[in-house]
Image (cartoon, grey):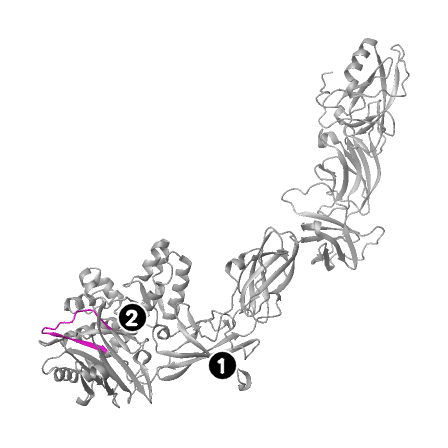
């Protein structure tokens, strides 16, 4: 007979009476569903098995073998009023009836049986074992023996299905009992433990449960009826109750369900339906056979029935299955993740294994240990005892009085920002006398019933990891969340990771294993810290002090997208973002440094540009157009960037030959600087081009901040080619730029391909006020009044070239008169009949550096006017003018 692992049969058993049957049939017949549940407590029978001088309780025995000695003891109450006959029968297949001597009659009411039990021995050729509990009647033993010998195949099937039904039912009940340990309101714990239980027990819970509100998820998961799926080789729906199917109507209805095959018995449903038909076919006037599912616990077979026993004709015979008689088939236990490394120093160590649900739902596997493998057969530490725990998702270290757990940091300590890294030493699962280092392997072994078996070999870490370091070159950037890889020679013993942004302040971080060994993926919340130093503290089991990895937080790095460099130039232009971090750029052995920054902001939405120049008098690098180089960019914080560069064709080169700038037409105001160009005057200039200037080229004229921009072209008429190398340009500032144009202008030549020359300064646009005269008192030292238009274009006014006591014109001033101190160059007495002039010194608002001169006519005021003027201006002498006082109404 083929070997079979009890929980992995190629067809469904009574224990998995296919939830599809009950769900489809019992939903339409509620009373039948209730009658079908195996929830009636039956009698108990104690069983022990002895083999080769060793005795085990029935709960530890997955299989029997010929020669095994069974101790049977009916555990009936002292007040039992009906005498039960216990019959032990052994079978040898479907087609070979057992001999009479394979049936053993045990009178449960016998005093000696009650006190000592009875012994039977498994015959040499036996393949199945089965027990019957029948009410005592005349000829009962012979009747049952005759029934079995007459139709042995029926009881072979019943024996197999009943024993395996208990195995599979145990998986379901283990899941339900374990889920009852979880607080119903803890959604995360419900999900986590359901996943662990499902994996170890090969179950698939109802996913719809987790879609319900939190308060309903718990009840959904622990319902004992139709809420779980067996997830083994058949992957069939199962429920926590079985149907006895006494009615032929039920069998007929079941066979016509769509999930059962639509009128034809499926391979899975057939076994179940056959069992009901078989047991129903044995019905006689004296006996009816009812199945019992056994739940072994120690030496006791705890029986559950789905039909109350009858003590009237036809009396009920309880059919009990025992383990099959066959060679042991060890459980296919395996590592859940072959790459996972477990830490032997972790106090609550769980070895994640699965693949053999009966290891977790029954007691067949016992005396499990983890054997630490050593090199060259050297003596290693003692074997570590293990206990299967489906709730924790694997094998846990069996608690021992010799292994005392030392205190570990609490969750509050791990999350307290002021709490230093933990310093308590966690307990080790290794004996103190056997220190180990690095990664080792351990093999799970134990007993499967009477037989030794060897399970999976697992990777283990026996010492805290060392050599912790950042495994990425990417810098940590302040102001955002960073993902970094942390490497070591072993990370299985990591308990917690925290970062110290400021001394004494710790922040826990989330981490997970990366896709490569000995790598951790950390998420560092650096959205608020400023650039600086960062300490990453790695707390490990078995190490009282954390391992600290130091790192540096940087600002958002400069990003260089392009570098423009033209053959023959001594300057370059970088394009990118955060270019203020650039310290220097090295190209072809020469170092370029940023040119003085402009105060003008970068227009929103446009890339930053950074001019870079060689030191004064440095020669241009001897590079040709098309040369491909690599520029090295040094940042101020020490980082270095590289950027590929292709040398551009030599830029056009122009020099200023001459210029003609109109001067003010006002005879009063005289501009000192030859660079100042009144906006009302035209500018004419000539340029010399080193190469023939193309007719489709242009001259760009712009303000330094590029807020003003104009293109002069041959086609527009404001650019004239005197010859191929000489260009004459004309600019009308007022017409081109408007009344708000002011400040320095520069120009450059641009080829039709868009290659531009260096900028050349050309002029500074200034707007001029219209000054008419200065009114002063005929006598005395009272202030004078300056009259004119657009006086807000003045920055300040002084009576001396040194601007010893200037009068400032405030921002926003719109008046037509300004009070100034009486110039000392005026005579003490003025005559209205003799006109005079005075020289004042002016700083223009558009170019406040030069001290321009104004030769202004002076008008003498009458005495009465002088008195009023003195009274009016007494408080404002030598002080800046206020807008509220000088509002143009004077």
Q: In the picture, which quadrant includes the N terminus? A: bottom left
Badge 1 crowding class, 10 Å Cα cut-off, few under 14, some 14 to 19, many 20 or more, is some
Residue at (89% x, 21% y) in the render: 824
Q: Is residue 843 above or below residue 287?
A: above
Q: Left of 400 or right of it: where is 25?
A: left
Q: Position of residue 477 (x, y in %)?
A: 63, 55
**Residue receiving disc 2:** 169
- Nearest-to-viewer mark from 2 and 1: 1
Report helix, strand or loop for mark 1. loop
- From mark 2 to mark 1, how far is it between C-alphas? 36 Å
Q: Quadrant of the C terminus?
A: top right
* Sooner in the amino-acid sequence: mark 2 or mark 1: 2
Asked if residue 304 is among those painted magenta in the image, a careful observer would answer yes
Q: Quadrant of residue 15?
A: bottom left
Q: Residues within 10 Å of mark 2 (few under 14, many from 20)?
A: many
Res. 5 visible in picture: no
Q: Is residue 12 above or below residue 206?
A: below
Relative height, residue 831 to residue 373 (above, below): above
- Rendering coords of residue 166 (x, y %): 28, 73
Range drawn in magenta? 303-320
Label at residue 852: none
Asked if the magenta segment contains residue 292, the reply would be no
Circle 1 residue: 382
Q: Image point 90% across, 13% down: which residue?
A: 829
Q: Secondary structure at mark 2?
A: helix
- Specify whether 405 is left or right of 170: right
Of residues 857 and 622, the one nearer the viewer is 857
Please determine whether, in this image, residue 48 is positioned above or below residue 706. below
Judge from the rendering whether residue 206 lies leftward or rightward of residue 93; answer left or right.
right
């Amino acid at each position: 007979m083929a070997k079979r692992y009890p929980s992995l049969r190629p067809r469904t058993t009574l224990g998995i009476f296919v939830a599809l049957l009950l769900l489809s049939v019992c939903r339409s017949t509620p009373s039948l569903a209730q009658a079908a549940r195996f929830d009636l407590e039956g009698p108990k029978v104690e069983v022990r098995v002895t083999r080769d001088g060793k005795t085990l309780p029935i709960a530890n025995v997955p299989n029997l073998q010929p020669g095994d000695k069974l101790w049977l003891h009916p555990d009936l109450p002292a007040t039992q009023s009906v005498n039960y006959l216990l019959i032990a029968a052994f079978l040898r297949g479907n087609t070979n009836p057992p001999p009479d001597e394979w049936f053993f009659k045990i009178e449960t009411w016998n005093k000696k049986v009650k006190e000592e039990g009875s012994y039977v021995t498994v015959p040499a050729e036996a393949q199945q074992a089965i027990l019957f509990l029948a009410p005592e009647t005349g000829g009962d033993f012979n009747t049952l023996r005759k029934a079995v010998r007459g139709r042995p195949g029926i009881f072979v099937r019943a024996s197999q299905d009943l024993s395996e039904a208990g195995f599979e039912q145990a998986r379901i009940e283990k899941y339900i009992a374990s889920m009852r340990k979880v607080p119903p309101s803890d959604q995360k714990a419900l999900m986590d433990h359901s996943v662990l239980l499902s994996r170890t027990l090969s179950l698939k819970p109802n996913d719809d449960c987790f879609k319900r509100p939190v308060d309903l998820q718990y009840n959904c998961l622990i319902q004992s009826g139709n809420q779980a799926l067996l997830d083994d080789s058949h992957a069939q729906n199962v429920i926590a109750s079985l149907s006895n199917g006494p009615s032929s109507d039920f069998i007929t209805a079941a066979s016509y369900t769509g999930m059962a095959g639509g009128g034809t018995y499926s391979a899975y449903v057939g076994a179940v339906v056959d069992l009901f038909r078989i047991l129903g076919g044995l019905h006689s006037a004296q006996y009816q056979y009812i199945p019992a599912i056994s739940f072994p616990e120690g030496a006791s077979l705890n029986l559950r029935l789905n039909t109350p026993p009858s003590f009237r004709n036809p009396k009920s015979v309880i059919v009990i299955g025992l383990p099959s008689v066959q060679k042991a088939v060890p459980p296919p236990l395996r590592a859940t993740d072959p790459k996972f490394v477990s830490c032997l120093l972790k106090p609550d160590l769980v070895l994640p294994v699965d693949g053999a649900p009966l290891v977790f739902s029954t007691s067949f596997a016992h005396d499990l240990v983890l054997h630490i493998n050593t090199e060259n057969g050297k003596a290693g530490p003692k074997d570590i005892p293990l206990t299967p725990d489906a709730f924790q998702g694997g094998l846990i270290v069996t608690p021992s009085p010799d292994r005392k757990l030392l205190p570990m940091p609490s969750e509050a300590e791990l999350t307290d920002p002021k709490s230093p890294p933990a310093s308590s030493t966690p307990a080790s699962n290794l004996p103190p006398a056997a220190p180990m280092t690095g990664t080792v392997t351990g093999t799970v072994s134990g007993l499967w019933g009477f037989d030794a078996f060897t399970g999976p070999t697992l990777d283990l870490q026996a010492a805290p990891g060392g050599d912790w370091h950042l495994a990425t070159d990417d810098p940590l950037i302040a102001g955002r969340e960073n993902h970094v890889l942390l490497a070591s020679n072993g990370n299985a013993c990591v308990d917690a990771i925290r970062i110290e942004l400021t001394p004494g302040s710790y922040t826990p971080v989330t981490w997970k294993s990366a896709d490569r060994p000995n790598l951790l993926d950390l998420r560092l919340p650096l959205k608020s810290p400023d650039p600086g130093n960062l300490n990453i503290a790695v707390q490990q089991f078995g190490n009282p002090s954390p391992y600290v990895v130091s790192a540096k937080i940087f600002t958002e790095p400069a990003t260089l997208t392009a570098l423009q460099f033209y053959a023959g130039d001594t300057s370059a232009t970088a394009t990118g973002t955060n270019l203020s971090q650039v310290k220097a750029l090295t190209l072809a052995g020469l170092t370029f440094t940023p040119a003085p920054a402009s105060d003008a902001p970068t227009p929103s939405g446009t890339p930053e540009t950074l001019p870079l120049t060689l030191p004064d008098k440095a020669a241009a690098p001897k590079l040709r157009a098309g040369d491909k180089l690599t520029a090295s960019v040094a940042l101020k914080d020490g980082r270095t960037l590289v950027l590929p560069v292709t040398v551009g064709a030599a830029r056009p080169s122009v020099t200023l030959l001459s210029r003609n700038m109109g001067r003010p037409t006002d005879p009063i105001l005289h501009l000192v600087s030859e660079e100042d160009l009144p906006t009302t005057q035209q500018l004419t200039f000539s340029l010399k081009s080193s190469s023939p200037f193309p007719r489709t080229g242009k001259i760009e004229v712009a303000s330094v901040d590029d807020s003003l921009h104009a293109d002069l072209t041959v086609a527009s008429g404001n650019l004239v080619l005197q010859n191929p190398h000489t260009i004459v340009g004309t600019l009308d500032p007022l017409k081109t730029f408007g009344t708000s144009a002011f400040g320095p202008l520069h120009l450059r030549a641009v080829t039709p391909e868009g290659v531009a020359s260096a900028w050349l300064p050309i002029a500074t646009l200034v707007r001029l006020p219209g000054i008419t005269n200065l009114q002063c008192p005929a006598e005395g030292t009272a202030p004078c009044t300056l009259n004119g238009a657009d006086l807000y274009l003045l920055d300040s006014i002084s009576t001396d070239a040194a601007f010893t006591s200037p009068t400032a014109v405030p921002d926003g001033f719109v008046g037509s008169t300004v009070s100034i101190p009486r110039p000392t160059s005026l005579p003490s007495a003025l005559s209205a009949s003799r006109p005079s002039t005075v020289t004042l010194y002016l700083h223009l608002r558009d170019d406040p550096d030069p001290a321009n001169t104004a030769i202004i006519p002076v008008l003498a005021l009458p005495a009465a006017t002088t008195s009023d003027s003195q009274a009016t201006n007494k408080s404002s002498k030598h002080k800046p003018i206020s807008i509220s006082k000088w509002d143009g109404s004077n």
